[in-house]
Amino acid sequence: MKSTTDGSLNPLETGLDELVKKLGEFKNVNSLMVATIGAILLECKGNKKYKKYASHITKWHEFLREIDIPVTRARQYMDIWKYYGLELLEEGCDIEKLIKSLPIVRKGAIAEDWLTKAKVLSHADFNNEVYMTRGHRHSSICEHPHVKEWGKCKDCGAWLPKEEIV
């Protein structure tokens, strides 16, 4: 525990390590919840069990609307379970990173490699890895050969390519 300049204890710094530890635990709990929701949704969709939820539900998107889960988010959660599920139950991971990796893994990349990257890389490094895997150059090595000049309209504030400015 650190003290202030007058020697008194600062209550805001008391237990900071414990708070950071709790944040890490809750991040893991979040990933476990998402993986579990994905598993449950896959089970509901698998044999069209969702149709038994209510008589007016005949399609998957109707079921998702009824339980208030957006279709895109449901697909992400189901894919997180499909590609990362068992590993996430053993040790959690940042869900946002996994969501960013899904388009790459869906195209055949090795899910275990991306799970490892999501666990060990910072957000910035992970984002760069995703960006470069999609065929783009990292900004630190790009020579920027295709630069477009932009200008801001003084009337409406919109940014426009220079060639479109009158």
Image (cartoon, rainbow, N blue to C red):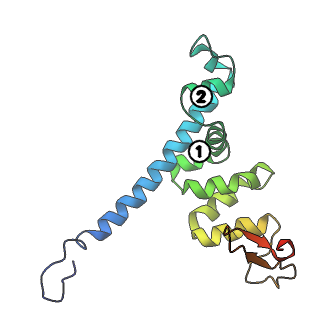
Q: Image quadrant of residue 163?
A: bottom right
Return the residue found at the far bottom. 5
Q: Name the residue under label 2.
A: 65
Q: Is residue 165 above or below residue 44?
A: below
Answer yes or no: is residue 121 visible: no
In front here: 15 or 116?
A: 15
Three-letter code, disc 1: Leu
Q: Image quadrant of residue 93?
A: bottom right
Measured Cα–Cα span from mark 1 to mark 2: 28 Å
Res. 62 mark: none
Classify mark 2: helix, strand or loop: helix
Q: Image quadrant of residue 144?
A: bottom right
Alpha-carbon neighbours of circle 2 within 10 Å: few (<14), some, or many (≥20)?
Answer: few
In front here: 116 or 123?
A: 123
Q: Name the residue under label 1.
A: 86
Q: In this view, does 55 lie above or below 104?
A: above
Three-letter code, disc 2: Arg
Answer yes or no: is residue 85 visible: yes
Q: Is residue 53 left or right of residue 83?
A: left
Q: In this view, does 6 lie above or below 75?
A: below
Residue 165 place in picture, x, y as percent? 82, 74
**Which residue is at 81% across, 79% downward?**
149
Asked if the residues shown at circle 1 and circle 2 are in contact, with their CB atoms under 8 angstroms apart, the answer is no
**Which residue is at 65% across, 36% downward?**
71
Of tags 1 and 2, the one toward the viewer is: 2
Residue 9 place in picture, x, y as percent? 15, 78
Residue 47 place in picture, x, y as percent? 68, 20
Work out whether mark 1 precedes mark 2 in sequence or the reverse, and give the earlier one: 2
